[in-house]
Image (cartoon, helix red, strand yellow):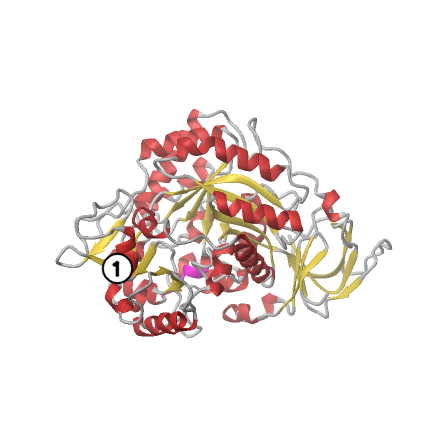
């Protein structure tokens, strides 16, 4: 994650930016979450950093200009989302509202109504439908044709790996029975060979998505601000945007220049399997561009790789075949030797690598490629990340700590919801199904775990993810799913604070309540250790601060 060739640097001093705002404050009359757990005490902030802590007493620091009464609540280091997509999440509000609809009919009706309400929109766009609302995760273009036949309709599943489109969208993309299958995508077909209307993975999705007009900079900037405000409202103070294209960097730079970045952001630039060599110089230029900004909240030090797809769509790369498709192991997006070459180059340029790997073969290939990268390049503090690690072969668990790989999990996924019971476990079988999300196993092996939401592919509040990490339950009355993988409250909090800060090379700057750290803080209305784990997400987020500046709440 180093910002330049020659290895990682210490985080840049952001004092110049923070000197423009009031950041001197004392927090009193509450609990502080420290290395010793929740303790009653006061905390003071001067110039945006924690200046003093007094456990069991009252801070005597007289330099602060404001006092905040915690009213018996708890003050924690701000949550750090190690894998999220705030602009994509913010854009969903601009288009057809299809998230949380429970049937294909309901989605179709929403599309039809939105099309009537927006007669001048050439393209009908939506994001967030649940692929588990059909038995096989497949969706027909004809269903959409019944309500919109003359304009293209393009809907993205909530995993953002699958597109459902109508016949007009297929026609404009030139997709028919003669269209060759892309190497890194799937065109789902009917029995007669015609495209059904369901496209999986980027190689197929881009045939349509490349035609969709890019929203204006103003629309995307508003979407980013909406997404970041949503995250700040749940106590998030730093994020890893885990999928950024060049046009997205423009939006982040614009937000930084006008001062509307509520939280700290590191960008992960997406590498293409067949274009990565041509991307090298542009990526270096984007990093330099971001480093030159006066706002200290934005960095671009990471490269993102999609090594496979997702299990529910049958595109995650598996060591053994899917049960419902006995000749298919999934869809690897990268040749391993090409992946090693790309990792070696970008790592050599000082970037951190962040690899999406969900299937057990995908995870193994990612571990193999990272191990090769480490052996080929010079030693340095590189902190490679494998995101999701949904299905890990038991013999590969210990390799995370051996190679020095951070496992970035989305803990909210660790529950037996319909995505698991309708699509995922039927495709894996119960034995492999119970190997999913080995969070505690990696921690017990000595590995490093960070948490993230993957919003809008997942649910964004950290407290909701922490609740699932502790219980692994769909509902409070459910049995825990693979209880050996349940975490304690402290373990889950650490993964969403210090663990994710470590992922961002920032554990010496933020992620814990220590003198000298930036005052990136979240105020919970009550002590989370006093409520049932199933109720954690019901706790009010009273306030969120970045370097002592309030970014959420009436503080």
Q: What stretch is highlighted in magenta?
A: 412-416
Q: Name the residue under label 1.
A: 197
Asked if residue 279 is positioned above or below residue 308 in the image, the reply reads above
Q: Which residue lies furthest to the left in this view?
A: 192
Identified at 32% across, 42% down, the residue is: 333
Q: In which quarter of the image is the N terminus?
A: top right
Residue 56, by quadrant, is bottom right
Q: Which residue lies furthest to the front in this view?
A: 120
Asked if residue 89 is positioned above or below residue 539 in the image, the reply reads above
| 271 left or right of 288 in image | left
Identified at 42% across, 25% down, the residue is: 376
Instruction: Give the image location of residue 51, x and y in percent.
Output: 77, 50
Asked if residue 124 is positioned above or below residue 106 in the image, the reply reads above
Q: Does the magenta stretch include residue 273?
A: no
- Between 339 and 58, the residue placed more toward the observer is 339
| 42 left or right of 348 in image | right
Identified at 46% across, 62% down, the residue is: 92
Q: How crowded is mark 1: few (under 14 residues within 10 Å), some or many (20 or more)?
A: many
Instruction: Give the image location of residue 509, x and y in percent.
Output: 66, 44
Asked if residue 354 is positioned above or below residue 68 in the image, the reply reads above
- Between 515 and 295, the residue placed more toward the observer is 295
Instruction: Give the image location of residue 499, x and y in percent.
Output: 55, 48
Instruction: Give the image location of residue 461, x and y in percent.
Output: 53, 63
Residue 54, by quadrant, is bottom right
């Amino acid at each position: 994650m180093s910002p330049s060739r020659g290895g990682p640097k210490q985080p840049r001093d952001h004092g110049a930016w923070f000197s423009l705002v009031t950041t001197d404050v004392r927090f009193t009359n509450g609990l502080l979450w420290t290395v010793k757990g929740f303790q009653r005490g006061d905390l003071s902030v001067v110039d945006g950093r924690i200046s003093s802590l007094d456990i069991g007493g009252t801070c005597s620091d007289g330099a602060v200009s404001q006092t905040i009464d915690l009213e018996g609540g708890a003050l924690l280091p701000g949550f750090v989302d190690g894998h999220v997509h705030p602009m994509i999440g913010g854009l969903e509000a601009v288009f057809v509202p299809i998230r949380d609809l429970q049937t294909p009919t309901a989605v179709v009706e929403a599309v039809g109504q939105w099309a009537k309400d927006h007669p001048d929109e050439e393209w009908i766009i939506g994001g967030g439908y649940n692929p588990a609302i059909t038995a096989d995760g497949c969706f027909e273009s004809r269903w959409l044709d019944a309500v919109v036949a003359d304009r293209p309709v393009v809907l993205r599943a909530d995993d953002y790996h699958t597109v459902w489109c109508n016949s007009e969208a297929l026609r404009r993309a030139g997709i028919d029975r003669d269209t060759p299958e892309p190497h890194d995508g799937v065109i789902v077909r009917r029995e007669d060979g015609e495209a059904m209307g369901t496209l999986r993975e980027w190689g197929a999705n881009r045939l349509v998505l490349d035609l969709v007009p890019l929203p204006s900079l103003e629309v995307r900037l508003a979407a980013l601000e909406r997404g970041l405000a949503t995250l700040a409202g749940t106590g998030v103070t730093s994020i890893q945007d885990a999928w950024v294209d060049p046009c997205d960097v423009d939006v982040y730079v614009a937000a930084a220049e006008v001062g509307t970045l509520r939280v700290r952001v590191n960008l992960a630039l997406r590498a293409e399997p067949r274009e990565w060599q041509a991307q090298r110089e542009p990526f270096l230029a984007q990093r330099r561009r971001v480093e030159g900004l006066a706002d200290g909240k934005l960095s671009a030090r990471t490269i993102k790789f999609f090594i496979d797809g997702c299990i529910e769509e049958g595109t995650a790369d598996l060591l053994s075949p899917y049960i419902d498709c006995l000749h298919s192991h999934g869809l690897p997006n990268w040749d391993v030797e090409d992946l090693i070459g790309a990792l070696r180059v970008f790592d050599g340029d000082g970037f951190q690598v962040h690899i999406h790997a969900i299937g057990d073969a995908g995870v193994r290939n990612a571990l193999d490629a990272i191990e090769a990268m480490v052996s080929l390049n010079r030693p340095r503090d590189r902190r490679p990340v494998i995101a999701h690690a949904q299905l890990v072969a038991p013999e590969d668990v210990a390799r995370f700590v051996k190679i020095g790989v951070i496992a970035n999990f989305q803990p909210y996924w660790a529950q037996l919801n319909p995505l698991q019971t309708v699509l995922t476990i039927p495709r894996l079988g119960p034995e492999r199904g119970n190997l999913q999300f080995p969070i505690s196993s990696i921690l017990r092996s000595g590995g490093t775990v960070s948490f993230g939401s993957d919003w809008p592919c997942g649910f964004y509040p950290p407290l909701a993810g922490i609740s699932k990490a502790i219980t692994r339950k769909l509902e409070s009355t459910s049995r825990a799913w693979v209880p050996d993988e349940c975490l304690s409250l402290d373990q889950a909090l650490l993964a969403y604070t210090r663990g994710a800060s470590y992922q961002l090379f920032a554990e010496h700057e933020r992620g814990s309540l220590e003198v000298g750290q930036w005052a990136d803080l979240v105020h919970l209305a009550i002590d989370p250790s006093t409520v049932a784990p199933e109720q954690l997400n019901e706790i009010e987020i009273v306030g969120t601060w970045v370097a002592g500046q309030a970014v959420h709440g009436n503080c």
